[in-house]
Amino acid sequence: MPRGSERSTVRSLQTSIWGSEIMRAEMEPSQKLIERFVLRYLRSIGGEVDETNSAWGVRLPADELGRFDRRELELALGPTEGDDQIVDGVIRPGSAFVDEMLEDAVGTAPLGRLDIEFDDTPKTLLDERTTNGVTAEARSFTPYYDRRAVVVLYHISVETVSRYETRELRAAAVDAESLMNLPKVARRFLTVTSSVNGPCVHKKADLKQSEVHSIWSSIEERLVNDMRPVVQRYREQAAEAARVEFSEYREVHEARISQFERELEQLDRRLNQLGLNESESGGEAHADRLRTRNDLKSRRQDIEKELQRLQSVRQEGFADQRQKVADRHRVSVRVNPDSFTEIRYEAGDMELHLHQGSESRYLTVGYGQGVGPIQELRCDQCDINFTEHNPIGGLDDGIFCSDCYDDD
Amino acid sequence: MYGEVDIEIDVEFGDTDALGRLQVGPPADHLCHIQALRMRASTPDDTLGSLETIEGGSVKLLEHQVDAAHRALFEMDGRALLADEVGLGKTIEVGMILKEMHYRDVQGSVLILTPAQLAKQWQTELRTKFKLSFVCNYDDAFEGFGAHDRIIASIDTAKSERHRAMVLRRAWDVLVLDEAHYIKNEATDRFDLIEEMDYRYGFFLTATPIQNELTDLYNIISLLRPGLFGTRESFQRRYVDSEQQGLANEPDLHRLLDRVMIRNRRVDTDIDFTDRIVDTRTFAPSAREMQLYEAVSEYVSASYERDRGQKLVLMMLQKEVVSSPAALRQTVSKRLADNPGSASRSQLTRIMQMCDEIEQPTKQRRLLEIIDEAQASVAKGRVIVFTQFRPTQAQIVDRLVTGDHLVHTFHGGHTSAEKEEIVGRFESTGGVLVATDAMSEGRNLQSCNVLVNYDLPWNPMRVEQRIGRVHRIGQDRDVYIFNLALRGTVEEYVLERLYDKIDLFQQTVGGLSEILSRLQSGDGGFEDAVFERLVNADTAIDLQNDFEAMAIDLEEHQELAERVGAFNSEVFADFDLGV
């Protein structure tokens, strides 16, 4: 099946209405990426891989025999046509061999540590938190200690009966102690792990199960919040589908009531027409009429009973059906953690030189390499944090937010 | 507000315990884990992007249909046999497939081949449910197979002298073949046409991939995926266990079928089908009808004894005599005209006279009672009456019209446009639709829930096809099935001794095929089995005993039945939902 459109390796980042970045973590398996993955995987289980030929020769340790049929494998590099049978596996996106290997890898080592290199310290900081021509030049960084960030990959899915499930793999990063949101770390993590030869060293993690549990518990609500626009769309559609279903039910119900009412009228007419003539008493025709009359009466009773039932359901506002429809259309959101990766970063002090026209000031802030400022900066007058909505606006005898500076 | 429904949101958080248990292996595995997780989550080319455009429209998609469309497109590389049981919405599945291809801009030329009577229905469904416009070969706008990119045509038009060359000259992007069991026989023009066609994606549809024997499947699938099963001989050798009359090398066959065939069974879906209420009414024939029946049976037995080559026409006579004197009379009259010097001339002439002496057939009288009863007690009051024979149909229609009933007639002689019109009229105005079995494939009549089998096909699959017209998705009422049979005739035997034994009227296609494939593989099918017993019995007692034996055979040969059941299950194992 030809592809309709290619997706970029790391999908475009959007900003949710709550301000945090939504980071989609799906990664399209390119041929090169798959080859590097297979190589790393085979080596991680102790295999020796000869990459010199067009087909790889693999020699596996004896204890991996359970996973593969034999110790020596010949793996073709795809795409190939029709010659799958002559090798032990084909390395290409979507091949059965690769799919099995991905399956195996997903089933192991969800907790770990990666040491990744962060970008150089930027020349300026706080760009999004300054206004009125204020700039913040990064002068010098003095690292004092290591801190730990944790990147979480998680699946989030939204589903309702009237709409196909949306399921996304997303990434979030937090500081292991303060639980502060570290979007830059998550972004860097995604870039590095999607690169064919990412500058990435794996080490034994210090993450404990209890820590993982506590981090997850503290961020799970936030992750659902990030999904809120999607959930809201689902809810609106579910409500519309439920409304249509419910009104269809109501219409059918009304139609049945009308039908029964009509039938009652017809029966009444027939009963009237059957009015018994006393002079016929005892005759066969009279007996026939009696029988017919009894039949019609009995049928009338049945219909009347059913009609009353239907009318009573209508009177109660179709409460049962309304609940049934609501239950059927409820929106289900599931959030499941898939992996926790510990990442070390250096923290210390960053000296900033702030300028505004002829005014300038020096300021030292807590800073994490690759993370950015990790300390809140506040207005000298109102003591409110500087953010993009409350930026630094003036440096005259202090550091002030734009509101306080403008008031002066 | 009256119409509003409050929608709740359930949020469920997974826990981290499972992750801790998976923590094994060297640190390098973690990077592999992350990359594997991320690559597996990437599904850029196998989501049905067009679903959003379909949903909320005029079609309600069911899970198994979405699943089938997805598998056909992405797991089977766009070449699939869609073999759901009757009534599960194969047309919808194809609609979704075509819509998705359209959405991805990968379809250029699309040809949908159907039995003639279904072409217009396909056109309407694709237009109304999927907003896909096709030209149909019955449209005035149709200018030949080379002039349009999206065509729906009858397979017989496509294979006709006039069009065949153009159909074969084009390289089609997509071929959809409805009722694909019509090409199970490799010695037919239809088979040749499909075999010679050039198409990139193919979707074949049938509820009954195995009509008679396993090689039916071979023929159909070999057209879709040439070479998948190897040569016919190697297929026979490999998968048909001729000694055990069963299946050999099942896992291998499963593996192959799984690459090309999707089969959903009703029992595996969430679909809540309404009940079937079956009312079989057996009536004593009048003395004249019984005499006629005996005369025809005697003639058929004797003629068959003399010349077995006349089997088909004799079988027809035997069926017609219980359908109506009118149907019988027409065939006998033609036989007399065709064979003026026949030794049986006096016998046939006498049969014709006997036909003429029957003024009102018993069944006809009883039919009127049922129709009145049904129309008085069932909402909307629509009734469909099935018969196998046009003269019977005409007689029923005459009688109903005389009785001031609103009647619609449907048979194979109508054009497709007329058929559309007839069904539309029946749906909008109600009344009685008297149809031949030309109605029984593909056309949907969920608006009707009362069906009368005026006469019964001896092929139970035909019966199931009839019922499938009304008892399918979208039918929100219980379905009433009335069977009419004349006591002491073949109908009684077939109904009471055979169909009841296999619980036909509550059966689904999957269940039936287990029984039929067994019978048909032995002696040429259910119809033949019935006929042979009829003509070979010397006395009425013998006949009863023979049918009894056939019935007992169905029950007592449990072992064989199980083997056949297992055979079908094996053949179609793992073809249910979600696999």
Image: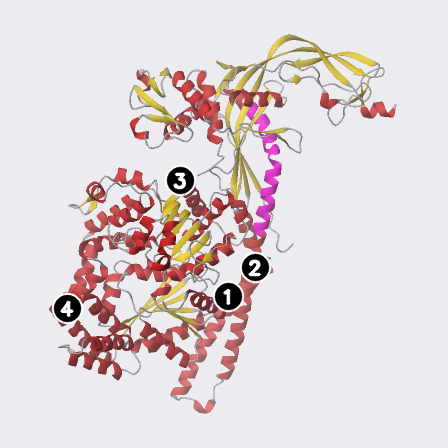
Describe the element under mark 2 as helix, strand or loop: helix
Q: Are marks 4 and 2 on the same chain?
A: no
Host chain of mark 2: A
Q: Residue at x 51, y 42 (%)?
A: B49
Residue A352 vs A23, above or below: the answer is above
Residue under pointer 3: B77
Frontmost residue, A302 versus B129: B129
Q: Which mark is residue A306?
A: 1
Instruction: Give the secondary structure at mark 3.
Output: loop
Callout 1–callout 4 Cβ contact below 8 Å: no
Are labels 1 and 4 on one chain?
no
Could you tell me which secondary element the residue under label 1 belongs to?
helix
> Looking at this view, is A224 or A127 the one in front?
A127
Whether A220 is drawn above or below B478: the answer is above
Q: Can residue A343 be spotted in the picture?
A: yes
Q: Are marks 4 and 2 in contact (CB under 8 Å)?
A: no
Q: Specify the amino acid type for callout 2.
A: Arg
From the viewer's side, name the closer residue of B210 and B185: B185
Residue found at the very far right of the displayed protein: A408
B572 on left or right of A201: left
